[in-house]
Amino acid sequence: MSAILQTQKLRVEYRTRELRQPVKIALTGLDLEVRAGEVFGFLGPNGAGKTTTMNVLLGFVPPTSGAASLFGIDVRQPIARQRIGYLPEMTYYYKFLSAEELLRFYAKIFGLARAEADRRIDQLLKLVELESARKRPIKSYSKGMQQRVGLAQALLNNPDLLILDEPTSGLDPLGRMKVREIIQRLKNEGKTVFFSSHELGEVETICDRVAIVHQGDLKAVGTVAEISAGHPNLEQAFLKIVGFQSAHAS
Amino acid sequence: MNKIFALTGVVIKELYRRKDFYVLFVLTAVLTLAAGAVNFFHDEKIVRYVKDICLLLIWISSLVIAIVTTARQIPAEREARTIFPLLAKPVSRGQVIAGKFLGCWLATGMALVVFYFFFAVITGSKEQSWPVLTYFQAAWMQWLLLGIVIALVLLGSIYFAAPSSTSTISFVVVISILLVGSHLHVIALQQPEPMQTVLTFVYYIMPHLEWFYLSDFVVYDFGHVPLLKIIAATLYAAVWTGILLLLAWLGFRRKNLTT
Amino acid sequence: MKISPFTVLLTLLALAFTLALGLAQDAAGWSQRGKSGNVLGMMFGDGRKLLANQFFTMADVYFHSGYYPSIFDNKAGQEDEPKAIVAATRGHEGHDHETGDKKCEKCEECGSFLGQPKDWIDAFGRNFKIAQHTHLEHGKEREMLPWLRLAADLDPQKIDTYTVGAFYLRNHLKHVNQAEAFLREGLRNNPDSCEILFELGRLYRESSHDLDRARNVWELGVRKFLARSPAEQKENRLVFEELVVNLGHLEDEAGNYGQAINWFHAAQKVSPNPAVLQKQIDEIQKKLAALLPVGPAKLY
């Protein structure tokens, strides 16, 4: 299977504004590969470099060295993002636009024809159950509604690769189930899903492969079974890999 | 271009859904009507002071709309983090800059049309004449100036995180150029070195916004500027706008948006 | 002990009311601005004089249709007062603005400040500013009136506002009644002003053709002038000369030649051109001589 998402010796350094402070290294040379059609979990404790990796893939942060590509195209090219959908952890959309206007705006960015855009928008608003609120400004939406708008815009261009940042964070059990269903459906359609999460239970259930990063380093990559081998579950394996010493262990 | 126009549309929607324009228009209208209602020596034909006051208010309002709207664009997107879902789409940072510029410029252009239409109605009702060409030239030149100002503010907003600092600095720079710009070389001659050299240098490299102020032609019924001069001024404005937008793009394209 | 917020509010209100009553009398003397009966005076305080000067300058700017030096164009040593608009009411040596020339060719000293373009930026920029020296005419002088009205409201003690305003109202716009009312207002605010009395007299003589009223007003002006201190008289000789010369012409026109000669003699004492006035006196003396009998009657 070909690599949809690839990083090669990806290194990201942040220069702090304080004097005499060392440069902060967020990624030390990450080599990562996500194949077409798989659901890939990207795990790590807070500050491990997960968000930095996503920021580089999405073009928000330039890499210090190394390379990253989507569908074989360097991530610095805007066209690399033509076939991806991105759902941020927090919902950040124009409050003065309605859901329909927002989706129509993004449809123009993707270059969708008017008729196709109309069809997709109707379909997605139905999927995320926002049909009745489509004309209201987003500032009048609840948090859950705003997250559903986020999901709709991530799926607008029928993406081949979906990048999700903590997709179930802050969702109630019903919301989490819906997200899992959507991910499963996308997988059945042959799409690729790349997401970061702290919900290891969910990761165990839906992911084909996972990668664990810690302090900017890739510590482990493989199927859930491979990584959990020798441990009761993925969580214990994760804790062992990141070097967490339980109080009970001593 | 469709992506740029899409961004333009969002900026224009934002302007007319915020209250800024309406407040300024109502203020301009009320002050102009109040000024026009005053009776001086029982002479109903006095009109120039109304034109003067109205045009001054139009200039102030259009500068406020242009600077405040533009200063907010990039910083507000970064603060509200709406820049991330946007840049996660297949749109380049240059297109974002172009779209923001075009949106702000067209939005202020539409505001100018409304202002000048109001101006024409008020003054025409007193003067019974409409020098359309002169009005058009004044509006066109003002719009060109606003283009340069918007590009300048966009550039500033890349480097200054807070919209308030960008707005304040932009106002100071623009008002200074309008008031003092054409006299800077005279002022320079009266200064000791090295200030003389500095001021002369600034005089030659700064955009001469005072060229675009044609209100006097409207107020004093001075006819219109020759077409070739207007075309030359338009090219000058286009060059300056291009330079400032290019600098804005250069500053924005490699900027780490997560800090 | 729990105190109700309403109790606190009532206490504060009572305290504020008591303080206001107690301080009211004293507070009246704290600010001169509060005593002004004029709204603009109350708003701006002493700053109104600066604003009045600015508005008077605006009237001059309007008179020149925008062709006006900025503070950067004004050369050192130039008078603060706008020259042209004041000079226009009296003309200046060798040139009379009342002929209403559209292009004031002889008035280079009034405001040709641009000079040659200093560089290409200056040269190109002149296409977008008013670079032609013109004066308002054919009724368009009315456009100056709002600024003169505002200047008068802000600084009622500024004499030139009334004299200039009345001049244009009377001479150019033919609003004689408005001009008289404006001058009368100026006189109420400046009862000792010889300049306003002079202008009022001109109005009666030239527009109303009422020689008696003109005489009364000008003679009052002369008395006011003579009541001034020697230092003030020395400073304002021009207005005295104008008063007595015009009185001289008036008496000449009325046929009171003796009185006319007296006035011209008085003018000679202060005039820089006594020889010119002497010619006037000589002509009147000829007229006077023509009226006297030729010689003693022959007895037969």
Image (spheres, rainbow, N blue to C red):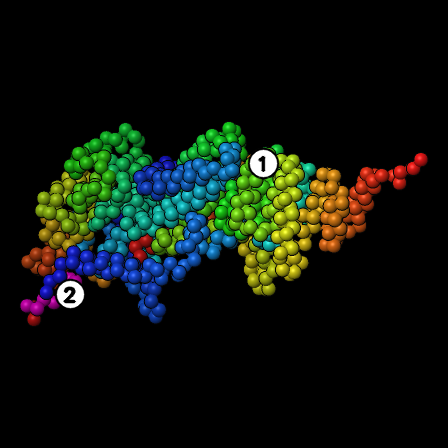
How crowded pointer 1 is (Cα within 10 Å; few <14, some 14-19, many 20+) is rated as many
Amino acid on which disc 2 is placed: Gly
Q: Nearer the viewer, residue B30 or B148?
A: B30
- The answer to which quarter of the image holds residue A103 is top left
Q: Which residue is mark 1?
A: C176
Residue under pointer 2: A243
Q: Secondary structure at mark 1?
A: helix
Q: Position of residue C265 (x, y in %)?
A: 75, 51
Question: Measuring 31% from the left and 48% from the top, which residue is drawn there?
Answer: B77
Above or below B186: residue A189:
above
**Coordinates of residue C234 in the picture (x, y in percent):** 67, 58
Judged left or right of residue B93, residue A222 is left
Residue C210: quadrant of the picture: top right
Main SS, magenta residues? loop
User: In this figure, what is the number of numbered marks?
Assistant: 2
Relative side of C244 to C15, left or right: right
Mark 1 or 2: in front is 1
Pointer 1 chain:
C
B199 left or right, relative to C47: right
User: Who's the residue at 22% across and 37% down the image?
Assistant: A136
Confirm or deny contact between disc 1 and disc 2 (CB under 8 A). Answer: no
Of C17 and A119, nearer the camera is C17
Taking C50 as reference, is B95 left or right? left
Chain of residue at mark 2: A
Q: Which residues are magenta?
A: A241-248
On the same chain, marks 1 and 2? The answer is no
**A177 or A79, which lies in front?**
A177
Q: Please indicate, yes or no, whether residue A50 appears anywhere in the rendered image.
A: yes
- Kindly identify the amino acid type of the residue bearing the numbered disc 1: Val
Is disc 2 placed on a helix, strand or loop? Answer: loop
x, y percentage for residue A105?
Answer: 30, 37
